Every structure is written in structure tokens, then in C-alpha cells.
Amino acid sequence: MALTPPDDATLTISGLPPEGAGRILLIACGALAHEILALKRINHWSHLDLQCLPANLHLWPDRIPAAVEQAVTDHRANYDRVFIVYADCGTGGLLQAKCAELGVQMVEGPHCYSFFEGNAAFAAKAEDEFTAFYLTDFLVRQFDAFVWRPMGLDRHPELRDMYFGNYTKLVYQAQTNDPALDAKAADCAKRLNLAYERRYTGYGDLATALTQVAARATAP
């Protein structure tokens, strides 16, 4: 059955897996729901099920390891394997340590901006782009909910220069070619008084990681 994530991508879950070997559960950040579902559909990965944790956990990254642990504990008995679709995401290595403790693997990289760009490519640009502010498809869609309002800019727009005065450009890492999202991203840059750059990344290392997970499950 096809799954459609809610607009805020807080929770998406399939039903319990059917009997038989090879079922894998992806426990993922809600901000990645659209991308993971697209990759599942494109690649016919019917043996991968998805549960997304609330995307707003990124406002409190110290809560991510415990949330992941709870999800693994709740669901791993129903699956042959569990894979964590988070990067470090501001946990300071705590999520990686928790995954090692639980015996599950996770996506490599410091954050989604890196793995969408490709971790090696992102690292190579780090010295030249330390004044760049990044948005993904999800963050363009949810700019007000995850950037503008949490920072209080809806109430105090004068804070913009305090928050973003050291940035020089907004880089929209586009996972899809969507003119409406492109226009919205450009408007986000204008609202932050930053130069605008659109960079098509596709799914980057996220696609690579999930392809490897799916292939290992189906290998003889």
C-alpha cells in the first residue's frame, strides 16, 4: 500500500510485515519521508517498511538518540533488520554510539545537507561555503514552521541580521525539479537578505545507502 506522508512529515508507518524473511524497517527522520517514499517507489523496494520520527526533533537533537532507541525497541522483533535513516544531526556522536549499542546501522554523514550533496563533495566545499545557509526540499516547504517562526522572525524581523548577518548566500539543495519549490526557495533567500543559489543534488548518498540496504536484504 502506498504511503503519503503528512505535510509536517511527523509520522509515517506501514503495517506489520508479512510472514517471511527479508523485511527491513527504516526508522527515519520525518524530514526525509518524501525522499524515502520516492526511492521505495522508483526502485520497487516493497520489502522495506518505513517509520518516521517527528521532524521537529531537530529542534532538540539531544532527544534523537532516545527516540530512535524507543522505536528500535518497539519494532525490531517484527523485522529481520532495522536501519536508521539519520545522519549525526547535531547529536555530537551520541546517535552513532546509541546505534552501536543497539546493533543497528545508520546513514553516514554529519547531516542531511552533507549526504544529499554527497558526503565527499560536501566536505570538499566546506572551506569555501562556511557562510552558506542550506535548505532541502522539506525545509523549503516547511520554512515558516522550521526556520522563520522558531527563530521568532515572524514577531521580530529585526533579528534577521543577528541570526544571518554572517551568512552570504542561501543554497537550495533540490532533491526534485519543481519550479514551485524553486520559486519558494528564492523567496526564502530574499526574506533572509541572502544571495540565492539552486543546486540540484537529487538524493545523493541517501540513495546509495538505501540501495545497499535493499540489496543486502535480497541477496541469495
Image (cartoon, rainbow, N blue to C red):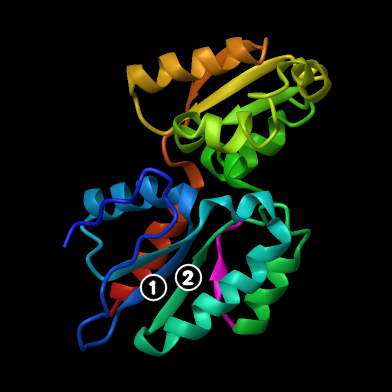
Name which quarter of the figure residue 118 lies in: top right
- The reply to whether callout 1 and callout 2 are in contact (CB within 8 Å) is yes
Name which quarter of the figure residue 62 lies in: bottom right
Give the distance between the C-alpha atoms of the residues marked 1 and 2, in whole angstroms: 6 Å
Q: Vertical placement of 144 versus 102: above or below?
A: above
Circle 2 residue: 83
- Residue located farthest toward the front when viewing the structure as drawn: 155
Residue at 66%, 69% (x, y): give it.
65
Q: Vertical placement of 156 versus 93: above or below?
A: above
Circle 1 residue: 25
Q: Which residues are magenta?
A: 103-108
Q: Vertical placement of 182 versus 220: above or below?
A: above
Q: Name the spot of residue 103 as percent of width and height, x first.
A: 59, 82
Residue at 46%, 38% (x, y): give it.
138
Q: Vertical placement of 111 versus 44: above or below?
A: above
Q: Earlier in the sequence, mark 1 or mark 2?
A: 1
The quadrant of the picture occupied by the N terminus is bottom left
Query: Is residue 100 or residue 74 the one in the foreground?
Result: 74
Q: Amino acid at mark 2?
A: Phe
Question: Is residue 130 in the magenta section?
Answer: no
In the structure shown, which secondary structural element does the residue marked by tag 1 occupy? strand
Q: Name the spot of residue 109 as percent of width and height, x first.
A: 64, 52
